[in-house]
Image: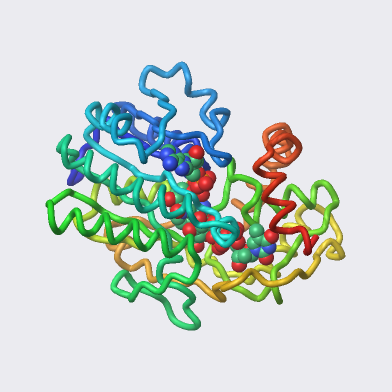
Amino acid sequence: MSNYTPKKVLITGGAGFIGCNFVRYLLKTDPDIEVLVLDLLTYAGNEENLEELKDSKRFTFVKGDIRDPEIVDSVMKKVDTVAHFAAESHVDRSILSAQDFISTNIYGTYVLLQSALKHKIKRFINISTDEVYGSIPEGEADETFPLKPSSPYSASKAGQDQMAYSHSVTFNLPVITTRSTNNFGPYQYPEKMIPLFITRALENKPLPVYGDGLQIRDWTYVEDNCEAIFHVLLEGKIGEIYNIGSGNQLTNLVLTKKILNALGKPETLITYVEDRKGHDRRYSVSCKKVKKLGWNPRHSFEESLQQTIAWYQTHQNWWGKIIQKQESYQEFFSTYYKTKV
Ligand code: NAD
Ligand code: DAU
């Protein structure tokens, strides 16, 4: 028996990468759950990510901003549970300008939390990141580790976490926070490293490796993260934080070579470019707490990387439209990478 049974779940940011995978996961896993997505459809949100779910009676999509209390109230009153994924999520964009990161990630979360209180929400899952701990030169950060965010993105996520925590302490809102490591898998917007490198390699374009390429990330397959989040929703303790990771720690260079190798492309596509400002060298979290709840990652890294590469190979139409037609993608790319690739 689970500790909690969600019936109708508001998924903010459900048209983005992890959100749309979580929507599918929930609908597939629990036939009694209904899902309501609230998403602004920013450059990173894409209705096509939810296309085949449109006719499901258990699925509703609302276009709207989490910073708008009226629209938030209108959806909040229809649900008992919130899984809050909506965010500005790309570190490099936060280096160019952090305004939207602060307003969506901190203020938008505040609007959701206040509305959740008003509508007596039974569980509010706050989706955060391992980046709030900052760079971890050695060992691993558990959930009590001090927050030391290095980028405007991770600083805004730390602000979001503290706002969520404050609502659980001050108002007894039943909040649980998850902090996951880097995700990869289908529907990831092609500005993040894995999809950027796969799509560029497919087009025989140089792969811009920042600095010496020896930075370390722990890569989690998106379905494993979805399972972990669902597990935390059912079994997690109110007011607690759960790290989620897979122990797949690789340097960017090793990962880049794996991608090139899988695609049969030459390593000469690797192009070393100027390092990201404030670039965290290594992320590493302890996942003992979530494992105690009974969750473990189920997917092998090598197999899921192959599946992800295959997905981008067969969904050229999906990413081609973004790369060729989306102004926001092109503008970011030419501004951020102008002097680099
Ligand atoms: P994403 O950028 O792919 O998607 C974000 C979604 O939020 C988009 O659909 C966008 O339209 C929506 N959105 C943005 N601003 C909004 C607003 N003001 N109102 C309503 N909707 C808005 O992000 P992702 O990679 O799927 O990440 C989802 C969450 O998981 C984020 O909170 C992120 O911080 C966190 N996270 C991501 C990773 C990762 O590796 N991708 C790892 C750890 C944590
Ligand atoms: O750790 C969790 C975080 O993972 C999430 O909170 C973020 O939302 C998500 O974007 C991701 O952040 P990273 O900065 O780690 O991911 P990104 O894919 O941007 O970069 C991964 C690594 O690859 C990082 O060390 C920077 C490097 N990189 C990235 C890009 C885009 C390159 O070397 N070249 C590139 O062009």
Label count reads 0
Residue at the (29%, 42%) spot, across then down: 112
Using the image as rendered, state which of residue 291 and residue 33 is in the foreground. Answer: 33
Q: Is residue 312 above or below residue 49?
A: below
Residue at the (77%, 50%) spot, across then down: 200
Asked whether the viewer can see residue 313, the reply is: yes
Quadrant holding the N terminus: top left
Q: What colour scheme governs how the chains and residues are painted in the rendered image of this protein?
A: rainbow
Of all residues, the one furthest to the bottom in this rendering is 138
Using the image as rendered, state which of residue 6 and residue 175 is in the foreground. Answer: 175
Q: Position of residue 165 (x, y in %)?
A: 23, 59
Horizontal side of residue 204 vs 115, given as left or right: right
Q: Position of residue 41 (x, y in %)?
A: 51, 34
Quarter of the view holding residue 43:
top right
Q: Is residue 210 above or below residue 315?
A: below
Using the image as rendered, state which of residue 102 and residue 37 is in the foreground. Answer: 102
Q: Position of residue 81 (x, y in %)?
A: 25, 38
Q: Is residue 169 above or below residue 252?
A: above
Quarter of the view holding residue 194:
bottom right
Quadrant holding the C terminus: bottom right
Asked whether the viewer can see residue 13, the reply is: no
Q: Is residue 250 above or below residue 194?
A: below
Horizontal side of residue 281 vs 181, given as left or right: right
Residue at the (84%, 61%) spot, across then down: 269
Quarter of the view holding residue 214:
bottom right
Q: Position of residue 147 (x, y in %)?
A: 36, 72
Horizontal side of residue 136 vs 82, given as left or right: right
